Amino acid sequence: MPPLTSLGSLPLLGCINDLIGKNKTCKYWLFGGLGSRGLLYHGWLGNIVARAVLSCDEHVIPSELVSWKNIKL
């Protein structure tokens, strides 16, 4: 389940290399937590993630959608 924020439950997008191991390039990506809104937003989010993967730049993704990485477990 994606974490509940002040904006509601947001999808989980971003590079997860830091969680797997240290790599120079973003090799592993997360695209999940869409829930019922996935039917509405899957095309837009897919486009964003595709641009981020092709450019190897996570900064293409809006900061709200990668904010889950700042949550301490």
Image (cartoon, rainbow, N blue to C red):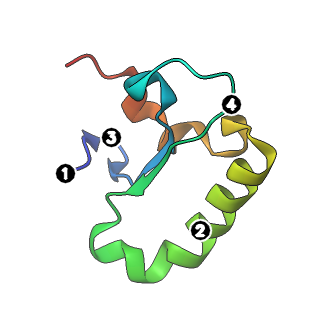
* Front of the two marks 3 and 2: 2
| Image quarter of the C terminus | top left
Answer with mark 4 or mark 3, whichever residue precedes in sequence: 3
What is the C-alpha distance between the residues marked 1 and 3? Answer: 15 Å
Q: Position of residue 27 (x, y in %)?
A: 59, 40
Return the mark for residue 46. 2
Answer with mark 3 or mark 2, whichever residue precedes in sequence: 3
Pointers 2 and 4 in contact (C-beta within 8 Å): no
The amino acid type, in three-letter code, at marker 4 is Thr
The amino acid type, in three-letter code, at marker 3 is Ser
What is the C-alpha distance between the residues marked 4 and 3? Answer: 32 Å
Q: Which residue is mark 3?
A: 6
Q: Which residue is mark 4?
A: 25
Report the side of 27 relative to 56 (left or right): left
Residue depicted at x 70% and y 49%: 52
Helix, strand or loop under label 4: loop
Answer with mark 1 or mark 2, whichever residue precedes in sequence: 1
* Front of the two marks 1 and 3: 1
Residue depicted at x 38% and y 25%: 19
* Front of the two marks 4 and 3: 4
Return the mark for residue 1. 1
What is the C-alpha distance between the residues marked 1 and 4? Answer: 27 Å
What is the C-alpha distance between the residues marked 3 and 2? Answer: 23 Å
Instruction: Check the image and report above or below for 69 versus 50.
Output: above
What is the C-alpha distance between the residues marked 1 and 2? Answer: 19 Å
Locate residue 47: give its quadrant. bottom right
Locate residue 68: give its quadrant. top left
